[in-house]
Image (cartoon, grey):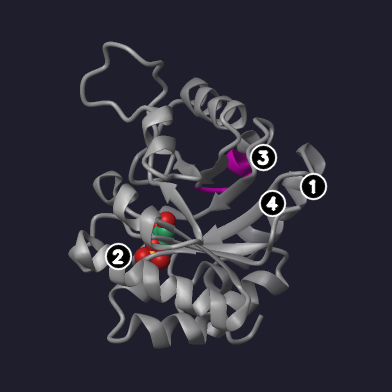
Amino acid sequence: MKDTPIVILNFKTYLESTGERALELASICQDVADETGVNMAVAPQHMDLHRVSEAVEIQVLAQHIDPVDAGGHTGSVLAECARDSGADGTLINHSEKRMQLADIEWVVSRMRELEMMSVVCTNNVMTTAAAAALGPDFVAVEPPELIGSGIPVSKAEPEVITGSVDAVKKVNPEVSVLCGAGISTGDDMKAAVDLGAEGVLLASGIILADSPRDALLDLVSKV
Ligand SMILES: O=C(CO)COP(=O)(O)O
């Protein structure tokens, strides 16, 4: 059983969520999860996976894993290395790190073999349906033009969420649908959940807030 609604905070490459500040932000997420009972996960940069996963009990995800087996692949991110660094799973095909379909399938399968969580990011209803056919744990639909815009997908493009939820039900009802892009407030998250999303994937609204703790508490206050 997946514990939803879930909030996944993607640390991206913001300085505000890098290094020591990744640790601070992950601890805040842990505190908010403990205080509110809302399931939270964090996706720090690869270099921060180990220290973050040592410091918190909430789930820690990689931002990307390469479709490679162990061996001669200099510079690639190996699934087993992410796991041994403390990752419980990974984001796959984020719009800032797009992959080919066969490679997405490869990483989803490897996550399943390693009993790790897979979150495939998509950009619209059609790609959400395609991703659901691969059987990941989650798909996260994020219209790229709204990412980092402060304009929440759950208000600007509600049909992308309802359309994704409907499509995924038909293709593979075991897959949970998340949404993201421009989400930052409790109203944004409530609107997403009311539209059928089982959680949100977000970044700038929390990471760049004056008080990430207050922003997170507000985010989960209505679900
Ligand atoms: O890309 C996103 C999360 O992975 C969304 O980013 P923002 O929350 O900054 O719009």
Earlier-in-chain disc, 3 versus 1? 3
Q: Which mark is residue 129?
A: 3
Residue drawn at x 32%, y 48% is 50
Which disc, if any, is residue 169?
A: 1
Q: Residue furthest front?
A: 54
Type of secondary structure dominating the magenta stretch:
helix
Residue 127 magenta-highlighted:
yes
* Pair 4/2: label in front: 2
Identify which amino acid the numbered label 4 is placed on. Ser
Q: Badge 4: how crowded within 10 Å, few (<14), some, or many (20+)?
A: many
Give the quarter of the image for residue 177: bottom right
Label 1 vs label 4: CA separation? Answer: 9 Å
Q: Amino acid at mark 1?
A: Lys
Mark 2 highlights which residue? 23
Q: Quadrant of ligand 1?
A: bottom left
* Residue 53: in magenta span: no
For marks 2 and 3, give the CA distance: 35 Å
Name the side, left or right, on which 116 lies relative to 159: left
Q: Is residue 157 left or right of residue 98?
A: right
Q: Which residues are magenta?
A: 123-129
Alpha carbon distance from label 4 to label 3: 12 Å
- Mark 1 or mark 2: name the one nearer the start of the chain: 2
Residue 179 vertical position relative to residue 137 in the rendered view, above or below: below
Relative to 203, does residue 188 appear above or below in the rendering? below
Q: Amino acid at mark 3?
A: Ala
Badge number at residue 176: 4
